[in-house]
Amino acid sequence: MAYETIRFERADKVATLTLNRPDRLNAFTAKVHEEVRAALRDAAEDESVRALVITGAGRGFCAGQDLQEVRPADHDSGRDLGQRLDRNYNRLIRSIRALAKPVIASVNGVAAGAGANLALATDIVIAARSASFIQAFSRIGLVPDSGGSYFLPRRVGQARATALFMLGDPVSAEDAVACGMIWKCVDDAALAAETATLAGRLANAPTKTLGLIKRLMDASAANTLDAQLDLERDFQRLAGSSEDYREGVAAFREKRPPGFKGR
Ligand code: LHQ
């Protein structure tokens, strides 16, 4: 499929979705959402894809909603922002969490508003040292969306998250690592190679199990210990009946690296 606003490439079990409107710092329009949805469907359905990378073209990762496309007048015409969230952003965040494969955000530059929260919705965030994360919403009179008010306090705690939401100050990639917002920060020149190495490792991991780990992590945020222990039991049952578990144990006994098939 030919895309206008994104690039979507597949190689060696890894799909890479690049937001591609660099002159607008890859801000989201309705068209971007439509194309990202199609690419995510593709990534979900294609069994040869075992990891997904989301990144941005040019100097930004994603500046959130394209503010040229929405105007306060939209509200008067009945196209309120809640509708926009239902139609676009909430679907996007839900489909990333529902994808039973690891998703990496490779944050190459500024991630603002829904762009920052898109990154936080992925499983592992790796960022270039020059990147920054901005909860820009309150700067324009909006509340955080795209799951930000769910993901951020769980990662950095209530105190930091509230201040970041209310002040809208940028957080450097290094500070984002230090406060637990993201996993890792690397030199700008090393981002592509480090992302490829990480994606390669995940794409050769036991995919089905990683999908279950993803669900465990999401459930953990709201579950009691009792409920989580039950879920671990149920998922271990599933993982324990996978081909990859058999291969993992066989490889250990035979003192060789495992060849996981993702099944
Ligand atoms: C942009 C944008 C942009 C259009 C840079 N739109 N052009 C959900 C539902 C519905 C409605 C509302 O929102 C949401 C969720 C949200 O995401 S709300 C938050 C929306 N995003 C923002 O408020 C961030 C706006 N952008 C900025 O504050 C700055 O551009 C940042 C801090 C990201 C980067 O600053 P700089 O590095 O100084 O770059 P710049 O501002 O010069 O931007 C470069 C160009 O990109 C520039 O265009 P120009 O023609 O002057 O070169 C900007 O106008 C354009 N751009 N963000 N969101």
Image: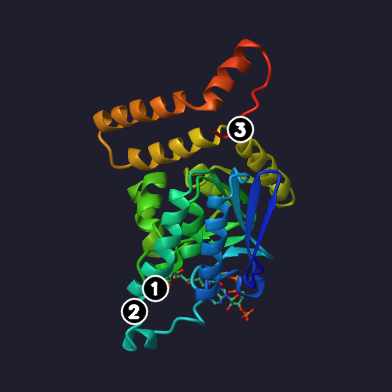
Residue 233 in the image: above or below residue 111? above
Q: Amino acid at mark 2?
A: Asp
Query: Is residue 112 visible in this depiction of the protein?
Result: no
- The yes-or-no answer for disc 2 within 8 Å of ligand 1 is no
* Picture residue at 45% right of the left edge, 81% below the top: 70
Towards the viewer: 111 or 90: 90
Secondary structure beneath dot 3 equals loop
* Earlier residue among tags 3 and 2: 2
Q: Amino acid at mark 1?
A: Arg
Secondary structure beneath dot 2 equals loop
Residue under label 3: 261
On the image, the x and y values in percent for residue 8 come to: 65, 60
- The yes-or-no answer for disc 1 within 8 Å of ligand 1 is yes
* Contact? badges 3 and 2 (CB < 8 Å): no
* Contact? badges 2 and 1 (CB < 8 Å): yes
* Picture residue at 57% right of the left edge, 56% below the top: 42
Residue under label 2: 80
Residue under label 1: 84
* Left or right side of 39 for 22: right
* Earlier residue among tags 3 and 1: 1
On the image, the x and y values in percent for residue 191 come to: 69, 49
Dividing the image into four quarters, tell me where ligand 1 lies: bottom right
* Picture residue at 65% right of the left edge, 46% below the top: 14
Q: Amino acid at mark 3?
A: Lys
